Image: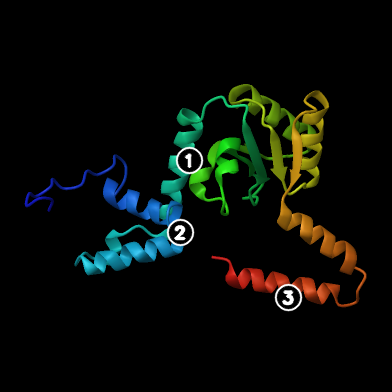
Amino acid sequence: VVSGELLPAPAKVVGSHFDIGRIILSVRFVINASVSMRASARICDLLALIQGLPSFEEPCHTTVQNFILRIGLYLIEHHTGFNPNRIWIIDHTIAAGTTKCLVVVGLDLSVYLQCNRPLEHRNLEPLALIPVNESNGAIVHQQLVDLGKRKGLPLAILSDRGSDLKKGVELLQNDNPDVISLDDIVHLVSRLIKKFLEQDDRWDQYRQANCKCANAVRQ
C-alpha cells in the first residue's frame, strides 16, 4: 500500500517462479549489503515468515546465485562498453569436470581513485566469462587480446600470478609494454610465507591447519 492505494501484484519474470520484487531483494542483499548468498536466502525466508508467506516460496542460495549469474551475463553481453581506463582483475574458476572459466572484471580508474574503503561488488564491471577445457600462457594471451579489442586494453592487470595467467599477461606486455602487471596481495603474501617457512618441519602441519580453517569458515 502506497498513499492509501493498493499496488498491482508484482510481475512474474518469464521462466521464473519468482516475481521481480523477490529477485531484486535477494540480489541486493548480496550486492549492496555484502551478505552471502546463503544469508540472502535466509533473510528472504525470514521476511516471508514475517509477511505470513510460506517459506518454500522464497529462493534458495543456489537460485540467488543463478539470479546474479544471469544479471552478470546480461552486463557482459549488453552493458559494458569500450574503456581503456580500466584495471582488469582476472582469475580462473574452480574446474567443474574438465571445464573452468577465465573470469575478468573491470575497475574504472576514476572509481578506484575515489575509493577510501575496500572495493565492493558495485565498483566492478563483469567483462568476460570464458569457458575453457585447457589453459596455458598462449591461450590466456589470446583471450586477453580478444577481450582488449572489444573492451579496450587495460591500464593494469591484477592476478594471483598462476603460471598460465602470469605467462599470458607477460605475452600481452610484449606488444603492450604500458600495461602493468599487479600482484594479488593475498597470494603474494602467501608465496612469501611459503618461501620463508617451507623448510620448517612444521610447515605441512601448519598448511593443513590453514586448509581446515578455510573450509570451516567458507560459505
Label 2: element kind? helix
Q: Residue at x 47, y 45 (%)?
A: 69
Residue type for callout 1: Gly
In the image, is residue 48 above or below residue 167?
below
Within 10 angstroms of label 3, few (less than 14), some, or many (20 or more) residues? few
Quadrant of the frame with the C terminus: bottom right
Q: Position of residue 4 (x, y in %)?
A: 6, 52
Q: Secondary structure at mark 3?
A: helix
Q: Residue at x 52, y 44 (%)?
A: 123
Compute the Cα span from label 1 to label 3.
35 Å
| 105 left or right, relative to 66 | right
Residue at horizontal 40%, vertical 56%? 29
Q: Amino acid at mark 2?
A: Met
The spot of residue 176 in percent (x, y) is 77, 25
Q: Residue 2 vs residue 74: left or right?
A: left
| Residue under label 1 | 72
Tell me if mark 1 has few (under 14), some (14-19) or many (20+) residues whose alpha carbon lies within 10 angstroms of its own: some
From this viewpoint, is residue 167 visible? yes
Q: Nearer the viewer, residue 106 or 20?
A: 106
Choose the circle earlier in sequence order: 1 or 3. 1
Q: Which mark is residue 209?
A: 3
Q: Amino acid at mark 3?
A: Ala
Instruction: Determine whether 200 is above or below 149 in the image.
Output: below
- Residue 98's spot in the image, x, y percent? 67, 46
- Looking at the picture, tell me which residue is in the foreground, 95 or 211: 211
Q: Which residue is mark 2?
A: 37
Whole-angstrom CA distance, mark 1 to mark 2, is 15 Å
Q: Residue 104: x, y in percent? A: 62, 39
Q: Quadrant of residue 149?
A: top right
Q: Is residue 128 visible?
A: no
Mark 3 vs 2, N-terminal side: 2
